[in-house]
Image (cartoon, rainbow, N blue to C red):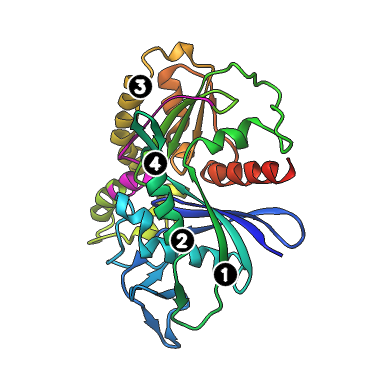
Amino acid sequence: MTSLVVIDEGSAQAKATYRAENGAIVTHVVPSRVAEQAKVDINGYSGSAYFTEEGGEYTVNGDFDDIIRTNIPSYQTSEANRALVHETLRQSGFAGRPVRVAVTLPMNQFFSKVQGAPINQKLIANKKRNVLGGIKSAAGHQLAEIIDCKVYPEGIPALFDTIRNDDGSLKPGFEEGMKILVVDIGGTTTDVSVVTPDGTIESYDSFSTGVLTVVERFSELAAPEFGLKRIPRALAEEAVKTGRLKNMNVSELIQRASRNVMQTILRELEAMVSTPSLLDKILMVGGGAALMGRDLAEAMGVEVLIPEQPDMAISRGIYKLEMLKARS
């Protein structure tokens, strides 16, 4: 039996949604940290090391100093991205099993502002081709067999997850004519769109700032505070997420680190939505929603929605859309 696995492979994390063997819908997260080398450990090649058909070597999910940049357009169709997709499938329990996958592109890459071609079909085709490309485990593990791949934009599917039931009907409190600002604060990009519940996109934009900008600034502030030369990225990410570095409360440093990012996002939102009062709600999703979402919405004076596990909302929304299509 072929399983559907949705992977929202953002610049900070790959977020997977799928149905477990007991029928429950579950999620799994793999950090988007990929090094351009097949790393080794005492057993030989690392279990998360890969060889691609093009001859590349990659290792996923380690606190490496030589990680590949995930915030550049070329990453989306790279061998490193393919390795991340397969490692996410392996960790999610799909080794040796046939799967259909749905993956994502940032909004400014999925859509095109060229008249007559609103969707970037060429890039989407390249993304599919890359995900379906040849790869093998350096450690000899079985890998999932990807038999089909679909591509969705980031941001917008989170609205479907938040406002619609599994049968596609609107949840209480939502109406078809509403205007909802969807703000997806990711690792290195923030995708913004004004969308109606039927999926009509009135406007959209993307800009280069996100949670990893906060992580980098936090590392700069925290390292001298604790007499360290550097704070490993994995440790800094966990601190920004939990408010604690080891056993110490670092919430004040995190607030300082996030201040500039919040101001940048707020300026972009105000430029895009000149009259916030015309919006019915703001939906904040992505890894930065819990960190900055309520403060941003309060500054704009609009009711905010932050779903449970906001970083998983895009992946869940795509899964719900795919299941609804399969039943229709």
Picture coordinates of residue 256, whole percent (x, y): 31, 38
As measured in the structure, the alpha-carbon distance from the residue carrying label 4 to the one carrying label 1 is: 28 Å
Q: Find disc 1 in the rendering and name its residue.
A: 144
Three-letter amino acid code of the residue under disc 4: Asn
Tell which circle, 3 or 2, labels the residue nearer the N-terminal end: 2
Q: Quadrant of the N terminus?
A: bottom right
Does 157 sit above or below residue 302? Answer: below
Q: Is 89 positioned to the left or the right of 62 in the image? A: right
In the image, what residue type sits under mark 3?
Met
The stretch in magenta equals 200-216
Residue annotated with mark 4: 120
Residue 197 location in percent, x, y? 59, 25
Residue farthest to the bottom, as pictured? 43
255 and 260: which one is in front? 260
Asked whether the beta carbons under mark 2 and mark 4 sit within 8 Å of each other, the answer is no
75 or 44, which lies in front? 75
Q: Nearer the viewer, mark 4 or mark 1?
A: 4
Query: Does 208 lie within the magenta span?
Result: yes
Q: Compared with residue 139, is residue 65 higher up or lower down, i.e. above or below?
A: above
Q: Residue at x 37, y 64 (%)?
A: 80
Q: Which mark is residue 19?
A: none
- Decide: marks 1, 2 in contact (CB < 8 A)? no
First in residue order: circle 2 vs circle 4: 4
The span from disc 3 to disc 2 (Cα, nearest Å) is 33 Å
Report the Cα–Cα distance between label 1 and label 2. Answer: 12 Å
Q: Residues within 10 Å of mark 4 (few under 14, many from 20)?
A: some
